[in-house]
Amino acid sequence: MKKDSNPIYKNIALDLANKIIKGEWQVGERISGRSTLAGIYNVSPETIRRAIALLEGMDVVSSIRGSGIKVMSLSAAEKFISRNNDNEHIKAAKENVFNIINEKKKLDKELEENLNKISDFIERFNNISPFLLIEVNIKDNCKVLGKKVNEIQLWQHTRATIIAYRREGNTVVSPGPDYIFTTGDTIVVIGNDEVYDKVCDFIYN
């Protein structure tokens, strides 16, 4: 549960204003004095004084020395509640923005670290392996449109393996032999240094 960030005196002021709105206290009525309220809310008289000062600042009540606290305005109580609720919403929104910014920084850092790892891996892979990763776009004139990888025997004809494909911004890794060649796709294949020419010749020629 999220911890209430309001100071105690502000919560008491909000509760008092709510009581006025609910009709527990009528306009013109004198409510309990500070000492009595301090006992009800189990706080110090100073805390009650600060709560009443908030309400007096918006003409919700009037504190008369020796005569207690008088309810002055129902509309002012409603305005007090509304204003403080708006302030809480703004405060919560600001906290959410800061949280999002911090999360984005973490994600950016993780992304950078992973990109560095990938770059390092590819560099080492290219240095020690005779295989290449290449991309091929699947266009309307591709002769294998609508067919599965295992139907056309791609590996047998080109020695290339499809390890991923991109479609409408989404990337699918390890699609397997059931991948169907579809216009607009970009396939990622792995093979030897002649793999690009072999794959293009096979699926287009």
Image (spheres, grey):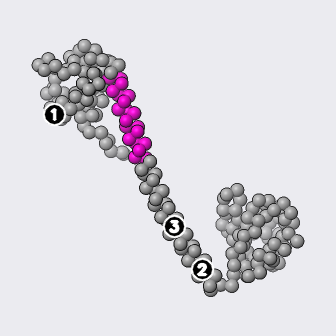
Q: Amino acid at mark 1?
A: Glu
| The residue positioned farthest toward the left in the image shown | 66
Q: Is residue 159 left or right of residue 34?
A: right
The residue positioned 66% from the left and 66% from the top of the image is 173
Q: Residues within 10 Å of mark 3 (few under 14, many from 20)?
A: few
Please name the residue shown 84% across and 74% down the image. 201
Q: CA distance from mark 1 to mark 2?
A: 69 Å
Residue 150: % across, % down: 79, 70
- Residue 83 falls left or right of residue 158: left
Residue under the point 84% across and 70% down: 203
**Which residue is situated farthest in the top direction here?**
28
Q: First in sequence: mark 3 or mark 1?
A: 1
Q: Quadrant of the C terminus?
A: bottom right
**Is residue 7 highlighted in magenta?**
no
Q: Label 3, on which residue? A: 112
Q: Disc 2 marks which amino acid?
A: Glu
Relative to 52, is 24 above or below?
above
The residue that disc 2 covers is 123
Give the residue type that dot 3 points to: Glu
Which segment did they paint magenta?
A: 77-96
Find disc 1 in the rendering and name its residue.
Answer: 46
Question: Residue 117, percent across and down?
Answer: 53, 73
- Which picture quadrant has residue 25? top left
Is disc 1 in contact with disc 2, using a CB cutoff of under 8 Å?
no
Question: What is the CA distance from the residue labelled 3 to the residue labelled 1?
Answer: 53 Å
Query: How far apart are the two marked residues, 3 and 2, measured between alpha carbons?
Result: 16 Å
- State whether residue 94 is above or below residue 54: below
Place of residue 161 in the rendered image (x, y in percent of width and height, measured from the top left): 73, 74
Say the numbered circle drawn on residue 200.
none
Q: Name the residue nearer the viewer: 56 or 37.
A: 56
- Relative image position of residue 1 (x, y in whole percent): 36, 45
